[in-house]
Image (tube, coloured by chain):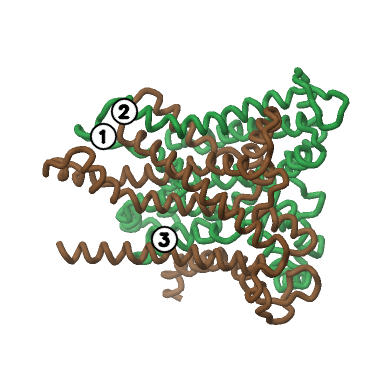
Chain colours: A brown, B green
Amino acid sequence: MKWLRKNLIAIIGILVLVYLFVPIAVVAILSFNEPAGKFNVAWNQFSLEAWQNLCGVPGVCQSFLTSIEIGVLATLAGTILGTMIAFALVRYRFRGRSTTNLLIFLPMATPEVVLGSSLLALFLNLAFPLGFWTVTIAHIMFIISFVVVTVKARLQGMDPRLEEAARDLYADPQATFRYVTFPLVLPGILGAALLGFSLSFDDYIISAFNAGTLVTFPIFIWGAAQRGIPVQVNALATLVFVLSLLVVLGAQFTNHRRRRKLESAV
Amino acid sequence: MPALAPVAGGAKVSVGAGVQRRARTAYLLLLPGIAWLGLFFVVPLVSLFFTSLQSPTGTPGVYQPGFEAANYLTAISDYWPQFVKSFIYSGIATVLALVIAYPLAYFIAFKAGKWRALLLVLVVAPFFASFLLRTYAWRTILADEGFITSTLNALHLLPEGRILNTPIAVITGLSYNFLPFMILPLYAALERIDPRLIEAAGDLYASPFTGFRKVVWPLSLPGVVAGTLLTFIPASGDYINATLLGSPQDRMVGNAIQINFLQFRDYPVASALSFILMAIIPALVFVYIRRAGTEDLV
């Protein structure tokens, strides 16, 4: 009884963590299912069909690749633009910084329907053709804010003495940046990029407004939801989930080991 | 992490003597990104506003510049139930998310020790799984013959005899989907609390509950405010949960915007709806922050 009271918070906390993964487990389990009807919602029979034939449904892999293409392009552009803003905000004093901060914050505090529909209103008024580029433009827009916030936090958490030490050792500003600042901020930038990619890859609402006839992976899923989502979609989503998680956990682990090594060296 | 935005935004900026450089470089660094946000965030909002005032030309789907304030009346009179539902569903979902998220955030901040970093990764991990599929998975979990629905039915707890295609399913989906946005700011706020303050409360004969109510909860308020906003705002504009988990009677304002833009091609009314949604949220946020007494904290 005493044990229970002492560990109550831990037990509830872990239950909540498990709760977070229940729907994901459902998605993964159903990727090994052979559905009874056209809707893959209840367990019927074990099958590896979807995993052996990932592109077995017309359009699945095409939409998957489209989403990866857009994700890579948008992440690249958004990460570069966002990192530049983060450096300017943390390292320089200039007029208009609070306006800049507000402009960064607002897209994150605006519902996706408003972001998506306002961009569509603009593209319609300009008679700009909808498709690959309009979706990419939209994704770059919302990635920038998330990158700025993530990289800014990393820059602010950096020990300023490291850069001072470099200067004391006669490193010029370029060398200080190249050998000290940038390597220290890089994990933050990579983390921001990974976040940006998963936001882009997973975005449905903003893309749906600006895609025209283009089909991204989430748009494919949405369309399929009415007539039954193919098992392949579950398999591909499970694959993406497992791979991303491995990348993040791997990075976490190497980071941890590097720190341990550094600490034991001191 | 995205959800830390309002928390991190308030952090102080360290400017050492050596890092202060000319403003010109700063503007060069800012220019491309800010220009992008200006062109594809600010200009679209202006464009949305003008579209909301356009008038019909007679040809369906084609509109001309105008000053049709009546679009706003149409939007409100035709869709006020959807607005009300949006704010009620997302309000309940936000409170639920707070209750679910708090123990986990508390656990990670105070009890997790060396597992802290790993647990934080696990909290954001759901973002790597498709939002649409995670939502759709609730159709399996809450299925009519499923374990949860039959158990609750056996206890006669469900007035409609089912969960799927009712507001309960929509609210469940909403509160689940935005949980990480609640957990992260809560954690960020809790993590800053000195654990010795809690011990001190205990030393002064406060029961654990009083200690929580008088020490931990007030100090975690910035996280509570940030987390509830980051959950409520995306939830109130969402139409994925309402479409996949609810019945046609449970549609929210996001559905109305989507259907008017993409199916009816009634761009002016759709834009008016979007604009009203965007205007109501800051108003609600303002009132909420005043009530929570955290104007200085956000």
Q: Is residue A14 above or below residue B46?
A: below
Q: Whole-percent x and y of residue A3?
A: 42, 75
- For the residue pair B43 and B216, the one nearer the viewer reads as B43
* Residue shown at the point (43%, 48%) measured from the top left: B220
A145 left or right of A208 in image: left
Q: Which residue is mark 3?
A: B108
- Type of amino acid under label 1: Val
B156 left or right of B24 in image: right
Please tell me if label 1 and label 2 are on a single chain: no
Pointers 3 and 2 in contact (C-beta within 8 Å): no
Q: Is residue B37 above or below residue A179?
A: above
- Type of amino acid under label 3: Ile
Q: Whole-percent x and y of residue A152?
A: 37, 42
* Residue shown at the point (55%, 30%) measured from the top left: B39
Which label number is shown at residue B15? 1
- For the residue pair B136 and B230, the one nearer the viewer reads as B136
- For the residue pair B219 and A49, the one nearer the viewer reads as A49
Which label number is shown at residue A184? none
* Residue shown at the point (15%, 45%) measured from the top left: A165
Among the 4 quarters of the image, the one containing residue B108: bottom left
Q: Which residue is mark 2?
A: A93
